[in-house]
Image: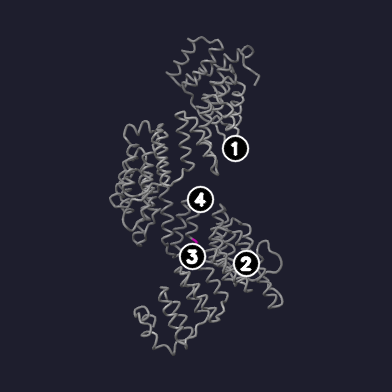
Amino acid sequence: MLEDLETVSNLDETLKPWEKSLTKKGRTIILKEQVEWQRAMEIFDWFKKRGSHELNVIHYNIVLRILGKAQRWGEIERLWGEMRERRIEPINSTYGTLIDVYSKGGRREQAMEWLELMNKRGMVPDEVTMGIVVQMYKMAGEFKKAEEFLKRWSLCKCQVEERVNGAPRSGIQVNGSSGSTVCLSSHTYNNLIDTYGKAGQVKEAYETFHQMRGEGILPTTVTFNTMIHMCGNNGRMEEVASLMRKMEGLQCHPDTRTYNILISLHAKHDNIEMAATYFKLMKDASLEPDAVTYRTLLYAFSIRNMVSEAEKLILAMDKKDLQIDEFTQSALTRMYLEAGMVEKSWSWLDFILQEKCLPNAIQPTLMLSANVAIFSEAERAFNCCREGKRLTVLEFNVMIKAYGIIKKYDEAFVKVGQLEMAVRLFDEMIAFDVMPDVVVYGVLINAFADIGGVKDAAKYLVEMRNSGLEANAVIYTSLIKLYTKVGYLKEAQETYIMLQSFEAGADVYSSNCMIDLYSERSMVRQAEEIFEHLKRKGNANEFSDAMMLCMYKRNGMFKEAIQNARKMRELGLLTDLLSYNHVFGLYATDGRYKEALATYKEMLSSAIQPDDSTFKSLGIVLLKCGVPKEAIGKLESMRKNDPQSGMQEWTSALSSVICVLDTDCPDRKDA
């Protein structure tokens, strides 16, 4: 009969011969076997038209699930109304079905409405329905709500049992709940452990695990898989090993998912040898690795550039006719590119471009190729997409970024025309009827900001707004960079105000740009306001302090400058050559020779190599301490001829002169 239903469209022809003998169970089986919702409804309606074919709530449940999977919400509501008309009372599983299909169909609010309706009718969800609701909360990441629901459900279940049996049964007590408890199946325990695990409540998950065993319910492979996954994700790898031993002691055999979890966890914790060992153990246990197993390990090998190991897995996957997913394809292409095996990377790129592969797999390849060394490969990849008519806004985004990735726009763009190429690519994008998004505009605005191209940056900003797109924080940051570069104070201030209106506010880079702009104009108060704001938020860095130091020095505010310099040293903000040179310049100008010497020795001990600017400031120190220009000139010659010996001579000269003049040098003590 089922075969006939698949091939014969006329239901009378197929079902009429069985009309008298078809049982309720037979009707249930027929409905369950239907894949297409339209066919299921046709059969269901045929049964209803035949008075001899009684349809019960189970039949309605089956059809409701079929309609829910097809997301036929209107049909579900119509069928629900029909149940009321026919006085077919919904049962626990009816509500569970409705909650489940609405939740999985992305209609969580409506799913909760079904749960509320169930509660209003005084019906306590059974374990299956409870599991469905908990799963719904987990899928939404609302683990606290899942736990609260479990508490309420446990309490309600106990009250029902007391009314029916006179006393509650001994069983699980959900974390934080009080009073009576209920017995649960291993399936529900697993669900509860998983809920705690995903919420990061490891202690509660372990308590539930031990309670489960205390109730005499043996953990299943699913239980151990859940516990192992939770411990591994929380970095508790020793407990992973302990759980494996417990699993073995209880004769609970690992399945394919167990090994997949172990391989993934050890790869994630950079123990690739152990991941490979579990792959071998899996095969030794006569378990067949599935696509997930191979993909997980192959991706782990690829991102570590383990070419030989990756190629062995590829051969094994080919033999089993297992497909490699887009992310692993991209990782393999990247592996070959980073290993300098460009032609092999192209064999994968060609594979990615085949019809069976998703188009966005090419984007990481484009981004990796988009650097100075193999920039031509990025162009080649993009042209392949173009020829295959596989271009989307994402490919254009990546390629335009590729032209802007070098950052030395004044050298590379002007010389080889890459900025012009990015602009031409933008025009081509429009010609392809692919509308640029805010990322594309952001890349172009940033590129012109780096070369001080105010007119062009403003042009793309206007175009972006005219197309209905709003500037984001990244674009405003680029504009601040541009305006501070060309000295547009008013425009920079207006843009900074716009940037502060975002929830995250202005970042440290934009704030430093404004401090620099105010510093150049000796606008001390405005610079200090931004600097103090950065400090309150804990965002001030070495550049913030260095710019404030330079501003104070430029304006003759040496006391404030010295305080900044000392604070930089105390906080460990002297981390690069530029910040050290700013401090040396200040100490030399203000006659703080001992501090200059101490900072110089500190610089050498931190393995930061001084440059000409450093020795220019130190030369001023020696000169102010009475060392002749000729002697300083000899020190410089020695340094240039033999840098290592020369630096030692500088240290010796500074130490001897400053120590001799310790009581006579005007080393200030007023700050």
Quadrant (top left, top right, bottom left, bottom right) of the N terminus: bottom left
The vertical placement of 213 against 477, above or below, is below
**Residue 61 image point, x, y percent:** 51, 76
Query: Tag 1's secondary structure?
Result: loop
Circle 3 or circle 1, nearest the eye? 3
Look at the image and say whether residue 256 sits in the magenta stretch: yes
Front position in the image: 540 or 377? 540
Return the mark for residue 105.
Answer: 3
Quadrant (top left, top right, bottom left, bottom right) of the C terminus: top right
**Magenta region, residue range:** 254-258
Which residue sits at x=35%, y=38%? 373
Spatial CA span between label 3 and label 2: 36 Å
Question: Which residue, given by chain and number where applicable, does mark 1 sit on?
Answer: 538
Residue 112 visible in the current orientation: yes
Q: Residues within 10 Å of mark 3 (few under 14, many from 20)?
A: some
Left/right placement of residue 43 relative to residue 532 reads: left
Question: Which residue, given by chain and number where applicable, does mark 4 sit on?
Answer: 269
Left/right placement of residue 22 relative to residue 392 reads: right
In which quadrant of the rendered view does residue 533 lie? top right
Amino acid type, label 1? Gly
**Colour basis:** one colour
Circle 3 or circle 4, nearest the eye? 3
Circle 2 or circle 1, nearest the eye? 1
